[in-house]
Structure formats: structure tokens, C-alpha cells
Image (cartoon, rainbow, N blue to C red):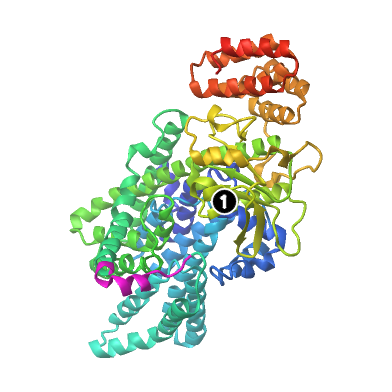
Amino acid sequence: MFKKAFRWLDDYRFTPLILLVLTILSYGLFSRSMGFFMDDWYVIWFGKTFGAAQFPVYYALDRPFMGYFYVIASTLLGKSESPLVWQIFSLVLRWLCSYTLWGMLNAIWPEGKRQNTWVALLAAVFPGFTQQWIVVAFSSYFAGMILFFLSITVMIKAIRDPRKFWLFFSLSVILSAYEIASVEFFYGLELIRVVILWIIFSRNNIHFWPKVIKTLKYWASYLVVFVGFTIWRTFFYTSVNHELTILDALKSQPLTVLITSVQKVYQAAVDAVINSWAEIFNLSNYPSSGIMSWVILALILLVFTGVLLWIQATAKKDPITETSARWGKEAIWVSLIALIVAIIPFWAAGLAVNNQYPDNRFMLAYLPGSCLFIVAILELLSKEIRKTAKILLVLLVAFGVGFQFTQGLHFRNIWKQQDALYWQLNWRMPAIEPGTTIMAWSFPNRDYYSQNALAAQLNWTYANSIATDRQIPYQFIFLGSNPMPEFQSLVPKQDFTIDFRTYEFKGNTSNSVLISYDAASCLRVLDSQLTPPQGVMDDYTKGIIDGAELSDLSLILPAGQTPNHPPLIVLGPEPTHTWCYYFEKAELARQEKDYSKTISLLDEAQGKGFSAVNDSEWFPFIDAYLHLGKIDQAKSLSQKVLDTHDTIYQFGMCNVWVNYSAEIGDATQKQAVDSSLKSMGCN
């Protein structure tokens, strides 16, 4: 059945279609169930708030030319704020990356269709980069890679078509200049251009020195661009987020820098060529049970069978010849140099490069070198071994699809956690006083959140408008990783300012609310009196306790006073109300001292079969029963907490009773409550 299906595909002209199928299977099956991650949030929010035309200003202190990409992308996508639209856009760009790489290789080695196709197949599933689903932020980098491949392709066309030389050559230089200046990721890869030119001119049987002169002549324009950008970036422009650190290091410890640089180049190349591909066979990266484990296995088998049959069908029209050996010898040099020079921009900025999240974003620069090196090695093997090497290639492709699918599953699960966090925050805080900072120590999967991204989400939800002076009314701070001195010491009544690109936040440490979220239970709003962290958290720190001292619940405004505006286009419709909805609303009612509503919400939740996810979630209902004079019901819920034998929860439960006892004016009633405190072991 498969053979019949592939009869009409037995030609390399169908490679783009095969690449598209691999791209969809690897990255596209979860597109409808993804939101935004990391930088995606503030890029989309900025465009919505200030307009897409402002993106060049937005990136002026970072990568000044990148802003024009987002102006174009936003216009093409109709200024869409939909994650699905951006997922599809990013999917198309990822496909174009492997497609334009294939086109570039065909331009360099027109006789090597088989080898070029193998490289493109590997590139479509390259496992060194696993952040495909951060679609808005990385779409610009995919575009930069596409421009790099196109620039080399057009350069070769210029050399081979003298009639259109200046048209193609000028276009190639322009593409190169914009790609280097806008993204910088592929700055080092520009140095393989001279190697490619050398290979092209080597086929004309030119003597050595004339060939050197001709190569340098054609490379000169690109070299001017490369050197010009290097001088500008080194001496005249300082990026706020990517400052060059290598110059100071070379001045102070040149020998140490040289040794460590060689080590870094070697290790990054090993990660790109060996460790990244080895990860796709590491079974610990896949679900060990459940329906998804079978889905992934079926996907791998389907891709393996399909790609193998297609490769066998196309190989009949492209037998192994002497040109295979020449392709392998030339490609090995291009790939080795690509693996060496790819690290230059990250090395210069002191950035770590490896195949682990989040540093594997830099592995995008290693994609062409890694894939080209693997195929070149296979081509340099003996003819007999080469005939069976395609099995290894197909295994890499099939497991690469399964690996990337699993990464998509991972991102989908993280999005579910984030979506739950955002909705619970909306339920607990219907409105927030402008000028408020939301604090947290950390979140599960902390590497997939950022302060500025969460600040964008807060302002998208709670800000009715942004002032013309671009002062945003809300900010988010991670206490555990925040460098700001005001939030390291957590001293009250300290003014501070946070500048981010083109907008700023002016706040005060005392205008803060502390939250906690572990994804396993409901979001908590913490303070030093009503809900101290010592009563709900197993791993509280001094920083969390100090943050609770600053936490001011009065900054959370009553429901309906100033309604929020959750970005439904991102979050989707409000989820079905389960326990955490009723808990968050009950906590809000308790804060507003509407104890009857608190118990009403409990009754409604229990009537629908819901119960506390975490035993500390009984606290607001114990408090409500006490204030309503229903001591027996309060004791009954308190016993649930006592039965856990958890000293943390018992402390929190006792805190509720002690707070209530301190409010009682009647001596007899106070004595009865204190007696209950004693019987429960509360000191």
C-alpha cells in the first residue's frame, strides 16, 4: 500500500512536500492548544498597546533592525493577537528554513540532489533546538535563517548568470546585511560564504592564485558588510541585553580566554552533532505510559516507513557515483567550518551554548553545520556501507519527529499550567489598584516564565489604558531571581523604577501583593496575617516571609469595581468552574468579610462534587464559619487539617483561630474559643 502511494512521489521535486509533512508532524499537531510563552507576551502586548509601527523604537536598544521584521509580520498577519495565527506563521517559517537550506545546497551541489535532500530532512527535525513553540519571539530568527540561505543561493545564481549578475549580487548583499544586523544569531556563519565561493570556483580548473584572487573579489562586498557591522557593533553600539564581554576578558586574561574558547567551540560542536541527536534515542525523554506513549511510537513508525520508502524510490533515479565522494569531501569542510564559526556571536557576548533549555536557542546557528556534517560523514564511508547508511538517516528523521512531538506535548502541558494560573489570578483579583506590583518567589517550570512577560499579561488584563508617557500601571517581580536592591532587602515604603525598552513602571515596595502557585493546587494570595506562607508552603524562605510582610490585600479591589479584561483571544474562553474557581472567589469574599458568600461558595462547590485540592484550602471556610458563629462546623473542617499531621497546615489552621480569638470582645466567647485552641494543640 505504501509502495503504491509513493510511486508518484519518486522524484526529488517533491522534497518540499515531504519537508512540509515532517514540519507539521513535528511542530504543528498542538498548534490549536498553545498560547504564548516568554517574550511572546510582551511583543504581542506592545504591538496591541502602542501599535506595530513602534516596533523599531521598541527594539532600538537591543537589536535595532529586528523591529522592522515585526512591522512586516504584524501587517501580514492582520495585527493578529491569536496564538494559533502565530503558530501557523512560525510553522511556515520553520518549513521555509529547511526548504531554503535545500535550495542553497542544490545551488552549491546541483549534482548532489540525494545528499542535499538528506540534509534538508535532518534539518526539518533538528533536535538541538526545542523552542519552536515560543512562536512570536523566534519567528524573527527563523526569518533570519531563511534570509541567510537565500543570500547564498542568490549569490551563486549571480555567479552563474552574468546577464543578471548585478541584480542577483546586489540582492544577495542586501539580504546578508539585513540578516546580520537584525538577528546576529547567524553572524558567525557568514564566514562559510568564502568557503562556498572557493568550492564554486574550484570546479573551473583555475590555478591556485587566480582562484584565490577571484574568491576574494566576489567575497569583498560581503566582507565589507561583515567588518562594517563588526566595527559598529563593537565600538559604536551597545546592546542593552547582549553586551559584548569578550574584549574585557581578552584584556585581563588572554591565555585563559583562548583555552576556554577552544573548549567552548569543541563542546558546542559535540552538542550539536552528537549529544542533540543522541537525545532523540533517550527513552527518558518520552512518556513511559499512557495513550501518548503509543501515539508517539505509532508516529515514529509511520514516519520511518514513509521516509524509507520515499528515499528508496528516489534513490533509483540517483545512483551513487564518483560525485558522491566529491560532495562528501567538500561538504565536510563546509560543515566543520560552520560548526566552528557558529559560536562567534554567543562567545563574544559571554553566552552559554549547549543543547539544554533555555541555552539551546543558540543551537539554531548550528542547524546547517550539524545536519551537513552527519550526511557528509555518511557519504565518506565505503560504497557498501553507504547503501545501508540510509537506514540510520531514516531513524534519525523518524525519532527526530517523535522527539519534537514530545517537546510539543511538554509545551502544551506547560501552557495548561500557565492558563490555569492566569484564570485563577483573574478570579482572585477582579481588579487591582494601579501602581501595584505582584510578587512571587517562583513558579513550576520557572524557566518558561519571565517577569516582563507576566507584567505584559497583567497590564493586558487590568490596565484600562496606558498613559501617553508610557508608564504602565502594573509590574511583576520574581523575588528569588530579581536583581533590584529594593526587592532583595524588601524594605517597606521604597520607591523604585523599572525601565523596559520603551516603557517604565514606577512603584513602591509597600504597594505589593504576594502570590504563590505550585500548579498542583490553587493559586494563593499571601500576607503576614490572613494567609501567612508558614501555614501553606512547605518550602517557604525568609524572602517569602519578608514579601508577605509587604503584601497589602487592600490593593485587590472588590469585584465589579473596575472589571478586568482577560485576553480571551490568548487564554481562550473561561474554563469550566471546578474547585479552584470556588476557592478563589471564596478567598476574595473572605477578604471582603462577606462570610456568608464564602460559605455559599463552599456549599455550591461541594454540591457539584468538588473538594479541597490541598488541605490548607479549608482555611477561608474555617474562618467564615467562625465569624458566622458556627463553631462546630469550623471545628469539623479544622479536624480535616489536623488529620493530615502536617505541622505547616496545622500552623495555618491555628493562625485562623488565633486571629479570630483576637477579634472577640465578649470574654465568655473568647474563653470558649481559646479552649478550642488548646484542645487542638494550638499555642
Q: Give x and y (percent) for residue 367.
A: 39, 60
The correct choice, above or below, for 391 with respect to 343 in the image is above
Identity of the residue drawn at 77% across and 23% down: 597
Left or right, 539 with reference to 571: left
Splitting the image into 4 quarters, where does residue 516 fall? top right
Identity of the residue drawn at 62% across and 11% down: 676
Q: Give x and y (percent) for residue 386.
A: 23, 55
Q: Does the magenta stretch include residue 164?
A: no
Q: Does the magenta stretch include residue 253?
A: yes
Q: Please name whichever residue, 219 or 21, is drawn nearer the observer in this view of the structure.
A: 219
Left or right, 508 with reference to 253: right
- Secondary structure mainly formed by the magenta segment: helix
Left or right, 385 with reference to 187: left
Splitting the image into 4 quarters, where does residue 553 fall? top right
The correct choice, above or below, for 234 with respect to 71 in the image is below
Q: Please name whichever residue, 652 or 49, is drawn nearer the observer in this view of the structure.
A: 652
Left or right, 622 with reference to 152: right
Q: Find the residue positioned furthest to the front.
A: 667
Q: Give x and y (percent) for residue 321.
A: 24, 65
- Report whether residue 646 is seen: yes
Q: Residues within 10 Å of mark 1 (few under 14, many from 20)?
A: some
The correct choice, above or below, for 169 with respect to 582 in the image is below
The correct choice, above or below, for 629 with respect to 466 in the image is above
Q: Please name whichever residue, 645 or 51, is drawn nearer the observer in this view of the structure.
A: 645
- Report whether residue 87 is seen: no
Q: Give x and y (percent) for residue 403.
A: 40, 44
In terms of secondary structure, where does tag 1 sit? helix
Q: Mark 1 sits on what residue?
A: 451
Q: Quadrant of the C terminus?
A: top right
Q: Given the image, on which type of amino acid does mark 1 rest?
A: Gln
Number of marks present in the image shown: 1
Read off the magenta span.
242-257
